[in-house]
Amino acid sequence: MKKLLIASFAAVVSTAVWAHGTEQHGQMQSGTSHQMMAEQHPWGMMGSPDAIDRDIQISMADNMRFTPEQITVKLNETIRFVVDNDGKVLHEFVIGTPDELQKHAALMKKFPNMAHDEPYMAHVDPSKRGEVIWTFNQPGEFEFACLLPGHFEAGMIGRIVVQP
């Protein structure tokens, strides 16, 4: 029984680390480039730097707002989001469905030091810049948000409309 519990715990821990990376939020470098395979998500997939159609500037501030708060992209467009943290605290830019972002924000509240690093997110230190390169190959309405505890709840959420 003890061996089964230890094996189960090891499996859960290794899965959590694999799914979310190995660095803490506060220890991640701003604008980390992602050298991983592109995985399809409901909101698209990691884009290639060689396929960027345009850049979109996003500013994050300590008033818990993004500027702009809404963007429109075309289906199959690859965007390089250039994300500036104009604040004095860490912020992040995470793309996803409203449901996925809400679930992740709730998990971040329970585990505020949860380590993760995905190609659809940038953790940006104060006065620094990060970037996310993303291909929107699914039409619909999606969101971007800062999921740090308190930030999401304060309304640090933006909208992405992907037009066919």
Image: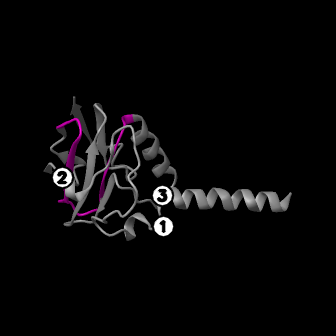
Q: Is residue 82 magenta?
A: yes
Q: Is residue 97 magenta?
A: yes
* Residue at 19% across, 66% down: 127
Q: CA distance from mark 1 to mark 2?
A: 28 Å
Which residue sits furthest right? Answer: 1
For label 1, the SS is: loop
Q: Which one is in front in this view, the residue at disc 3 or the one at disc 2? A: 2
* Residue at 52% across, 51% down: 110
* Residue at 38% across, 37% down: 42
Q: Which residue is mark 3?
A: 20
Q: What's the amino acid at mark 3?
A: His
Q: Quadrant of residue 75?
A: top left
Q: What's the amino acid at mark 2?
A: Ile
Q: Which residues are magenta?
A: 72-98
- Crowding at mark 1 (Cα within 10 Å: few <14, some 14-19, many 20+): some
Q: Is residue 37 above or below residue 126?
A: above
Q: Which residue is mark 2?
A: 52
Q: Which residue is mark 1?
A: 22
- Image position, residue 3 (x, y; %): 82, 62
Q: Earlier in the sequence, mark 1 or mark 2?
A: 1
Disc number for residue 12? none
Q: Is residue 91 above or below residue 107?
A: below
